[in-house]
Amino acid sequence: MSEKMTIKFTVNGIQEKKEAAVGQTLLKFIRDELHLTGTKEGCEIGECGACIVLLDDRPVNSCLILAVELDGKNLVTIEGLSQNGEMDRLQQAFIDHAAFQCGYCTPGMIMSARALIDRKPEPTDEDINEALSGNLCRCGAYQEIREAVKDASKK
Amino acid sequence: MLSYEYIKCTDLNLAFQELEEGKQVYPLAGGTDLIVGMRGGKFAAKTLLDIKDVPELKVLEENDRGITIGAAITLNDVVNFAPVRKNIPILAEGCHSVGSYSIRNRATIAGNICNASPAADTAAPLYALEAIINITGPGGERTVPVREFFTGPGKNALQKGELVRSIHIPAPYPEGKGVYLKASRTGSVDLASVGVAVQRWGDKVKVAVGAVAATPVRAHNVEKAINENGETNWAAAAKLSCDDISPITDIRCTRDYRFHLVEVLIRRGLEQTMGVK
Ligand SMILES: Cc1cc2nc3c(=O)[nH]c(=O)nc-3n(C[C@H](O)[C@H](O)[C@H](O)COP(=O)(O)OP(=O)(O)OC[C@H]3O[C@@H](n4cnc5c(N)ncnc54)[C@H](O)[C@@H]3O)c2cc1C
Ligand code: FES
Ligand code: FES
């Protein structure tokens, strides 16, 4: 049964109305229907954080959410952070600190960190560890990631 | 792609009807157990009934009878609720130890206990606080103490058509400190190998343990030694826990190691809450 439902939502500031298959995850919907491939697919069981997006301002694992649950909500993906071609300061800080090697975890990391700085403009190390507790980095760039988040929160 | 029907529910009566009449209808709260479980073939859901926007389930309040946490309230919202932090911080600790920050933005306490894993991290604190589970269904409302809510691994006391409406922690709150100590293989995003809740109540104590039996359990032998027989040697009291638990060996650790962990964590919990002797 690949029944479809019409859902209305906002994605990166733009209102949208689309058909979503019942049974499709929000992660697949973002990548395959909205064609926003910055959001990554890793484990698909909530453990790696590559798929983290902001739903009504909160970082959530899009692999554990159904596309139809997006109805009426506000979605922000990594593509939504830059403004008028200018990168978000967190994105710039990740580059400045070389806070990645392969970069696969980066979109999820940045979305978790963005939400942290929005709710707590001057986070401590402990706050950063908590906020990024669901983001794995197989390349082990944790130290640089923490530095980048701290740097971005200072500005 | 998974195959099922999805119903967004905003009316409790509609929910009861679907649950009573439908086959394989599963309430969907945060989905953090349900969606993983469906993918792994653990749940054969035909219909998902999304209850997280039902107004009656979004209650989060404190009054003179205690604290009430609606079934649609996320773990992060419980952790950040000032009356919980102030009066029953042990529950904030239990909620905070679940998964990761992003998981806790979706996961609920109700989902945690309905899923009824013996390792559920909110369970031991709820046992030590003697929480009450408010159940709602087509026949009206009823309440059960949390220790009767868990009936076996993955099994709970809900009848067909029923939902957990809220979790209630009755006042008066415990006088004294409470701690939740979780042993797991990694610092975050892992289930408990064992979880121990030690809650001081004046000069008495309540001790609950998860992941060591078919349901979470109270460590009655430990409690009796301290509360009734005046034992103040915490290491000696903690040893008695071996008669309260019946752990198994699984991928997280062996039965023997669980016996050891429980004894150590109960001793530490007693030291932290009742004072070092
Ligand atoms: C990566 C990851 C890490 C995790 N780590 C932990 C951990 O460390 N500790 C831990 O304890 N758990 C952990 N979990 C499990 C899970 O997050 C928790 O059990 C969570 O609290 C479940 O809540 P939920 O709202 O997501 O439930 P859902 O998945 O929505 O539901 C769970 C079950 O309860 C039923 N249900 C939900 N609400 C109700 C209701 N009101 N009435 C009746 N039935 C209902 C559903 O039908 C389903 O069967 C983890 C999960 C993931 C994916
Ligand atoms: S893909 Fe969602 S957490 Fe790994
Ligand atoms: S940079 Fe490769 S996983 Fe983090």
Image (cartoon, coloured by chain):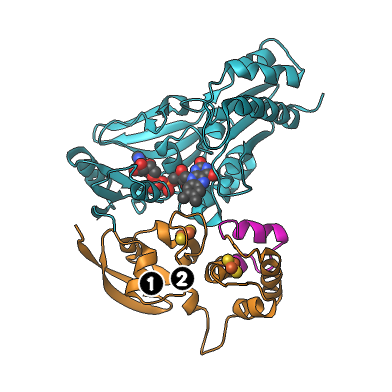
Mark 2: which amino acid? Thr
Toward the viewer: A109 or B171? A109
Q: Are tags 2 and 1 found on a single chain?
A: yes
User: In the image, residue A21 lies at what x, y percent?
Assistant: 25, 64
Rendered location of residue A86, percent (x, y): 56, 88
Quadrant location of the N terminus of chain B in the rendered image:
bottom left
Seen at 47% across and 64% down, the residue is A51
| Residue under numbered circle 1 | A31
The 10 Å Cα crowd at callout 2, few under 14, some 14 to 19, many 20 or more, is many
Residue B8: x, y in percent? Answer: 27, 55
Residue furthest top as drawn: B229
* The chain in cyan: B
Residue in the picture at 43% in, 77% down = A12
Chain A, colour shown: orange
Is the residue marked by circle 1 packed among few (<14), some (14-19), or many (20+) residues within 10 Å?
some
Q: Quadrant of residue B230?
A: top right
Q: Is residue A120 magenta?
A: yes
